[in-house]
Each structure stands twice: as C-alpha cells, then as structure tokens.
Amino acid sequence: MPFASLGLSPALVHAAEKAGFVAPTPIQAGAIPSILQGADLLGAAQTGSGKTAAFALPLLQQLQLSATQGPGGPRRVRALVLVPTRELAAQVGEVLRSLAQHLQQPLKVAIVFGGVSINPQMLGLRGGADIVVATPGRLLDLVEHNALRLSAVAHLVLDEADRLLDLGFAEELQRVLALLPAQRQNLFFSATFPAAVQALADGLLKNPVRVEVPHTPGNEPAIEQRAIAVDASRRTQLLRHLVKEHNWSRVLVFVATQYAAEHVAEKLYKAGIFASPFHGGLSQGARNQVLQEFKDERWQVVVTTDLAARGIDIAQLPAVVNYDLPRSAVDYVHRIGRTGRAGESGMAVSFVTADAEAHFRLIEKRQHLALPREQIAGFEPTETPAPPSSTDPQGTGGIKGKRPSKKDKLRAAAAAAATESPAAAHKKGS
Ligand code: AMP
C-alpha cells in the first residue's frame, strides 16, 4: 500500500519518500486516514513502529489546510505534542521539521524542554508556533512566563503516555490539560496500558479509533537475545572481547548507575575503544553532543543508565548489552528495543552474574523467555549462584519487581505441602 492511498497530500507523500519511507508501517496505515478525518486516536505502539510519522504526517496536513488565522493572538499554539524526555522532544521535533520543509507554506515547529536556559526558548516562541513539542514541566514554565498560550490548541498528541506517568508527570499533565480548549483532537500513544494509563486515555479521548500494532513475529524486529554467564569482575573484559569479535559498529551498553557509566566507559576508552558515558548527571549540552556523535558513528560504545532505554531512536543500532541487568522486565523490553529498529535485525546480550541469576530468571519468566546461559571461552564464570535463602525463598534479593506474586506464593505453598506429604511426593516422583 503506498503512502498516497492514505489520503496524504502530494507534498507529504513526497516528504515521506524523502525521509526514505517506501511503504507505511502498520501503525501508519492504521492511523493516518483516521487522524486526517479528525478522529481521536488510541495507538498501542512501541517506539520503532514508525509512530512518530504516523501522527506527524497527518498533523502537518491538517495544520496546512486549516486557517492560519484564528483566536489566541500572536502567542498561540495550534498543535501540542507532549513527550516524557528532552531527548524524545528533540527527536520528534526534528522529524516534524524535516517533514514540514517539503510543505508549500512553512509551518513553525518549536521544541522546548527543561535542563537548558529558558530564554532562547522564549525568544523562539515569539509570534507563536504552529506546533510545540514539549516536556510538561518546561511547557508550564513557559505558560507562566506568558511565552505561549494554549487556548487555541486544536490537536494534542500524548507520546509515550506510559512513560509520562512513569516519570511522575501526572500532575503537570493535568495542569496542561486544564489549559487546553475542550474542542480538540486527541492522539494518544503508549507502548503499555497499565490502569493509570488506561484511565488517562479514557478521560481524554472521545470515541477514539484504536490502532494496535500486534506483536506478531512478522512485524517485530528480529532481536537475537543472548544471556552470557560471567563473573561480575570480568564483564568489562568480556565486553571488549564481544565488541571486537562481532565488529559492532556501535553498541549501547546499559549499567545500573551514573558512576558505573563513567567507570565502564573510561575503562573501555583506556583500552582503545571509543566509548563515552551518557546519563542524567551530564549537562543537557553534553547529552545532546554525545547522542549526536553516537548517531554520527563517532563513538563506538555509549555506556548509559536507563535514561536511554526508551524513546531514543538511533537507526541501525546493531547491539545492546545489559552489563547490569535492568530492574524490571518492562525496562528489559525497552532496553532491548533500542536495537532491531524498524525491521532491522539486532542483538541484545545480557551479562548474568551469579548474584543476578535469580533476578534474570524472573525477567525471563515475565517475558516468557528461556535463554540458555552461554559461556564464552576464557570468560567462564567461577562464581555460582547462591541458593535461595529461607527469608528470600525466590532468591530475588528483594529487588524491585522481584516480589513473589500471588501465584508464586500458591505454587510455593503447594510445593511445600507436596514435600511434607509422602503420598504427594510419591505421586510427583512417579
Ligand atoms: P518511531 O517509531 O517513530 O521512533 O520510528 C522508528 C524508525 O522507523 C525511525 O528511524 C523512522 O525513520 C523509521 N520509519 C518510520 N516510518 C517508516 C517507514 N514507513 N518505512 C521505513 N522506516 C520508517
């Protein structure tokens, strides 16, 4: 199905072609016609599905078609895209700008986020903007400074709504929503739908068209997942070995703390691998620079915390490595989703130390995975996983997301009863 059949104008079909899009992805094919008709939309889709263009293309078309004059005065904003992180704001804003450059009449896209000086953003908003891409906190600051007005917003996009709530933006979000006119189009995208996200969607959307990108092997990127058993103290050496062995052009390495990001990156750098840390402790300028240089392939390895796990789109990332395991199964999915982007294949390697074995088993269970523990010659582990203790029968170490579920408790009780009862034990053994 070509882009032209979705109802997009020739200029935007051309813009999609110029962006290198040959055919619409499933979320684009499902969402674009409905958005063009003005419907509210509930999109269940991950980053990597093509969801940015799924809302960007029809949004630009509607703004192009609608009158350029209207209520709200010179500081008015016609479309608002709310995103959870600064990086995603920059990324989504750039996609909008690069698609918009093919339009006959220029549309102004302003990108605003916290962590940098507010003054240039205030200057950039002079005369209003057709589209503002914003993180909620900075957007409210700008409203308070009277740098923009939200009373003329005709289109609202919530991108990565689950992440917005995860990051504690619920209150800011409500304050922003209260500033918007009641009559508007709402486009809501989220990868997951826990109760709070669903409630937000229910409160916001009017008769939404639902577009779900099913997780079938056909449209899921091919991510080869591997688990390598290794001693904690040998992980940096193993990482060096893998980078060289696979000749990865770029690899994103996840660690647990900002300190570890600095430490591991430094060790790799000293060993002759171009590695840089990337984490929330760096200034916004430094973060932007590292990300851009990584995209430009000037860094081979970026060592990061979960800051980079969601939302960041780096095309053709061949590999991610969990040097430290993520805290939860959901974080695992987001981390490995940084590779295998838009149908390309990728490799996700998890280092499983003896201490982390029980935790990884739990992640596997939640993800319905059962990965063999590989051993790499020269890096065979010498430490063995600790047996489960009586205070921690699941051997989870009390880490977040490791509490036994009700089902786990019932199973444990049944297993205990079975070992106490000779008849049950016999039955089990027979
Ligand atoms: P997103 O899910 O919006 O973060 O997009 C993920 C990646 O897919 C980006 O690198 C886009 O440039 C790319 N992409 C989006 N739409 C298409 C398409 N129709 N064909 C090929 N690549 C696409």
Image (cartoon, rainbow, N blue to C red):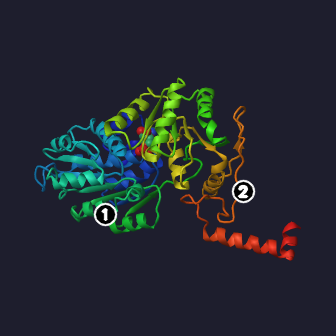
Pointer 1: what residue?
171
Ligand 1's image quarter is top left
Residue 85 location in percent, x, y? 36, 48
**Dot 2: within a 10 Å radius of its alpha carbon, few (fewer than 14), some, or many (20 or more) residues?**
few
Residue that sits furthest to the top in the current view = 272
Look at the picture and state if 407 lies above or below 367: below
**Dot 1: within a 10 Å radius of its alpha carbon, few (fewer than 14), some, or many (20 or more) residues?**
few
Discs 2, 1 touching: Cβ within 8 Å: no
Q: Nearer the viewer, residue 311 or 64?
A: 311
- Looking at the image, tell me whether mark 2 or mark 1 is earlier in sequence order: 1
Q: Is residue 118 left or right of residue 207?
A: left
Amino acid at the residue labelled 1: Glu
Q: Quadrant of residue 175?
A: bottom left
Look at the picture and state if 164 lies above or below 289: below
Residue that sits furthest to the left in the current view = 73
Amino acid at the residue labelled 2: Pro
Q: Is residue 138 left or right of residue 334?
A: left
Pointer 2: what residue?
387
Look at the picture and state if 18 lies above or below 160: above
Q: Nearer the viewer, residue 114 or 64?
A: 114
Residue 35 location in percent, x, y? 34, 54
How many angstroms separate mark 2 from mark 1 (CA)?
44 Å
- Residue displayed at 87% across by 66% down: 429
- Residue displayed at 63% across by 36% down: 234
Q: Nearer the viewer, mark 2 or mark 1?
A: 2
The kind of secondary structure element at disc 2 is loop
